[in-house]
Image (spheres, rainbow, N blue to C red):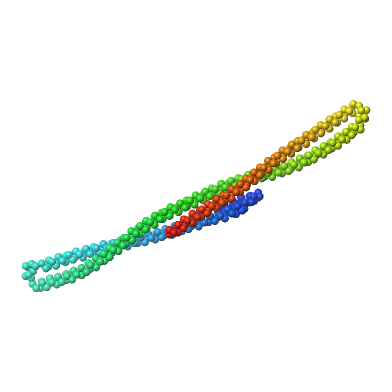
Amino acid sequence: MVDNNSLDISILEQSLRAQGVDISSDISSFEPERCILVQQNIDLRRKLEEEHQNYKRKLSNYQEGQLKQAQLVQKLQQKVLQYRKRCSELELLIERQKLDIDHIRLPTNTNVQSSSTSTLIYESRINQNTDEQDATAITLEEEKKKSSNLAEINTILREQLDQAHLANQQLSGDLHRLTNELQQVREELTKKTRDWKQEERIFNHYYNNEHNLIYDLWRDIVSFRKQFTELKGITERDLTRVRNDLAQTGRSLTSACFGFLTTTKTAEIQGQATTERERIDRINLESQIRENTREIADFQQRFHELSQLNEKLRMKLTEKENTITSLTRANQTTVSLLSLRKKESILLYRYILEKLLKFL
């Protein structure tokens, strides 16, 4: 896109230079700024994409850690359940042993009459059950301590899991908000780029039309100057010829008058035929003088009309020069506005990038 625009601008610049219009300073000041803006937009987009990918990667790692922690908590809960089940079994065993001891120690008439051998057997069983009961009580106490420790660890892990879920929700909300802001920035950048291209296309179309009009006017003026110069030369030659004809006619009239004065007496003698011929010659000379005078008046009127037309064209040329000046000023104003918009876009992208960096 940039190469095509550069090619179009180069073609337009060559065309204007061929017609004698120098806009190289405007083009040279406009093209680098646009290239810099495009490069900065590309860099900002790449940085935003990189930050977004890094943030997604961190969030994925954090979610994996939460999953592992949840699995660990589940395993600990299963282990706690196993310890509780074991403790219940031990308690049941202790109760059963207590019942057996009470049943053995219960005095009955039949036990009094039993032999000493049975008594020793019962006493040994009682001692054995007592030892087992003590060992079972110790084991039960240890298991209770372990169960209590595991319950505390489970509580701590639950609190950490709740905190992790809360942090995950906050991070998800921040990610959603940043995604929306990034989408808004992309839409705003796309809209500004589209508006800028539309303005550039409209300005180029308007500039090309005005350039073509000025070029056509300049060509008409050059053609008119050429025709006016040719007509002026022809008119001057015709006026010179008329002056020469008038001078020659005056000399002829003077010679005729002198000849008429010198030959008056001879003419009277020659008779009516000679008088009639002289009258005809005089009439012819007068008609020729009137015709020459009329041609001179026509040439003067035509010269006056051409002078007025030249003055009108000169005024029209002045108006077009003023139009060219106005277009040049409008071009400079447009370039200034485009530069201002570029600076605003750059400041906006920097602000968003700083905001993202502060958040990360």
Q: Quadrant of the C terminus?
A: bottom left
User: For the image shown, how many numbered marks are present on the structure?
Assistant: 0
The quarter of the picture where residue 227 lies is: top right
- Along the line of sight, the residue nearer the viewer: 30 or 322: 322
Q: Is residue 156 visible?
A: yes
| Residue at the spot 58% in from the left edge and 53% down from the top edge | 30
| Residue at the spot 39% in from the left edge and 57% down from the top edge | 171
| Residue at the spot 60% in from the left edge and 52% down from the top edge | 26
Lateral position of residue 241 relative to residue 93, left or right: right
Lateral position of residue 313 relative to residue 78, left or right: right
Lateral position of residue 207 relative to residue 76, left or right: right
Image x and y of residue 156, in percent: 31, 62
The quarter of the picture where residue 96 lies is: bottom left
Q: Is residue 75 visible?
A: no
Image x and y of residue 195, in percent: 52, 48
Image x and y of residue 137, in percent: 20, 68
| Residue at the spot 20% in from the left edge and 64% down from the top edge | 91
Q: Where 251 falls versus 120 (above or below)?
A: above
Image x and y of residue 3, in percent: 56, 54
- Along the line of sight, the residue nearer the viewer: 111 or 309: 309
